[in-house]
Image (tube, helix red, strand yellow):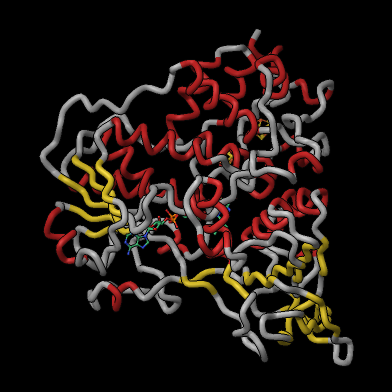
Amino acid sequence: MAKQRMLKFVTVGKEMPEKRDAGQRAADFREIYGEFAAAKAAEQASRCSQCGVPYCQSHCPLHNNIPDWLRLTAEGRLEEAYRTSQHTNTLPEICGRICPQDRLCEGNCVIEQAGHGTVTIGAVEKYLTDTAWEEGWVEPIAPSHERAESVGIIGAGPGGLAAADMLRRAGVQVTVYDRYDRAGGLLTYGIPGFKLEKDIVLRRVGHLEEGGVSFVLECNVGEDIPFGEIRARHDAVLIATGVYKSRDLQGPGSGARGIVRAIDYLTASNRKNLGDAVPEYDNGELNAAGRRVVVIGGGDTAMDCVRTAIRQGAKSVKCLYRRDRANMPGSQREVQNAEEEGVIFEWLTAPRGFAGEPVSGVMVQKMRLGAPDASGRQRPEVIEGADYVEPADLVIKALGFEPEEIPALWNVPELEVTRWGTIKADFRSHETSLPGVFAVGDIVRGASLVVWAIRDGREAAQSILARFGADGLDIAAE
Ligand code: FAD
Ligand code: SF4
Ligand code: SF4
């Protein structure tokens, strides 16, 4: 019987929840996709062919049990579907919104491979969890007994929050320290509201707080409190501090006013939308309104900057990237969204320098793709004599992030790092060179994805629990 409800991919086409019209959505910071109605979610879930070897699942970093929750959704058993999905994912409503599904679960769905269009796994995952919150199925964190051990978590991004959730459920005393005034890390201050509305993040934080997790905010470890003191206070420590050092641009004029870092620009915008006082936004320094904006970079951060600039009322928004569309690191879905909203992409271009003080233009050199480099990617080469000046009065540098020098900043030279500055941690246990100190997320992987930080956080929590002799609890990640 159940099978009859499935395998509908031949007769039912792929549909995403309705996307708001580009003109309308470019005028605000609300999410661009609507919600499935129950019947539509069931219909879309019924397209799944219930593969014996589900490639969607093996390409989800959390190994979510996707075929099962799709089948339960198709059968209208939504609460069971939600329980199955949240068993392996701490933040399913967030992953459903912002995982690059085209590179993970959906990109590997056999129906997609067969040319029928993927099952819309992310949209169903979001729908299930949003429904669970509305219906009151998301249960409070209520450990069956309290444990004496305590864990200090440095960093309240997805890695830290995922670990906090699992540890607290097992009765551990958990304190999360963060230098910002709100928890969430890049979920709160990096990623714009049109991809992830902030009340979604803060609802999760509230859920953890209600479950007994303590947050110590505006506390910069290494400055406001020594790392050694955190170690002394807790039985184990987890470092989940992310990567925040922006890669910089060289060349004449690169220090001019009006050339800003993507993280500063996006944080100011998110703060403004959260209702904070943001002088750098109000005085125009980090505000694109009425400006000719040029964003440099081709990753997801660049995509978030161009789309933020459109919403702030920029006069024009251009994105310069040194490779072509097919070779950019950012998601194709986000490029399409940006183009619909009015962003112009200048592929195969790179800045040589900048004119003016404050900046009035970018000196652009044109590129072509040459022979592959050691990584196998075609290396961009300059086409001599083809330079031009692109007028600009706000230039946003979105060239990626590197780790801060934690051993020096925290005065722990014995904390081992890689040659890229990321913290060395055991692949499975996530323990660092310091006994009882674990590390997860971007500070270990380099700039990565939310879903990987969640996976790391869950795995590290398991290792810490095992160290406390608390393994065997029914909180398995897989
Ligand atoms: P973070 O989220 O960076 O959190 C680290 C936290 O540690 C921060 O709150 C910080 O304040 C705190 N901290 C740092 N140092 C200290 C200290 N010394 N003391 C106290 N606290 C400290 N990923 C996706 O999957 N999908 C997307 O669409 C996506 N979009 C992105 C857009 C942007 C603009 C950026 C920058 C990243 C994006 N990412 C996206 C990547 C994703 O946000 C990160 O991979 C993820 O947030 C990493 O989680 P984390 O917990 O390791 O670190
Ligand atoms: Fe897909 Fe991400 Fe959900 Fe995994 S967590 S099923 S990769 S959307
Ligand atoms: Fe269903 Fe696609 Fe996963 Fe197969 S790969 S189980 S069709 S979602």
**Pick the front one: 101 or 259:** 259
The residue shown at (38%, 38%) is 205
The residue shown at (76%, 53%) is 338
Res. 61 visible in picture: yes
The residue shown at (37%, 22%) is 139
Quadrant location of residue 365? bottom right
The residue shown at (78%, 66%) is 318
Q: Which image quadrant shows ligand 3?
A: top right
Quadrant location of residue 462? top left
**Pick the front one: 333 or 444:** 333
Q: Does 129 appear above or below 310?
A: above
> Horizontally, is 224 left or right of 193 in the view?
left
> Horizontally, is 355 left or right of 263 in the view?
right
Q: Position of residue 254 (x, y in %)?
A: 63, 85
Q: Does 410 appear above or below 125?
A: below
**Pick the front one: 215 or 138:** 215
Q: Position of residue 449 (x, y in %)?
A: 53, 53
**Pick the front one: 79 or 337:** 337
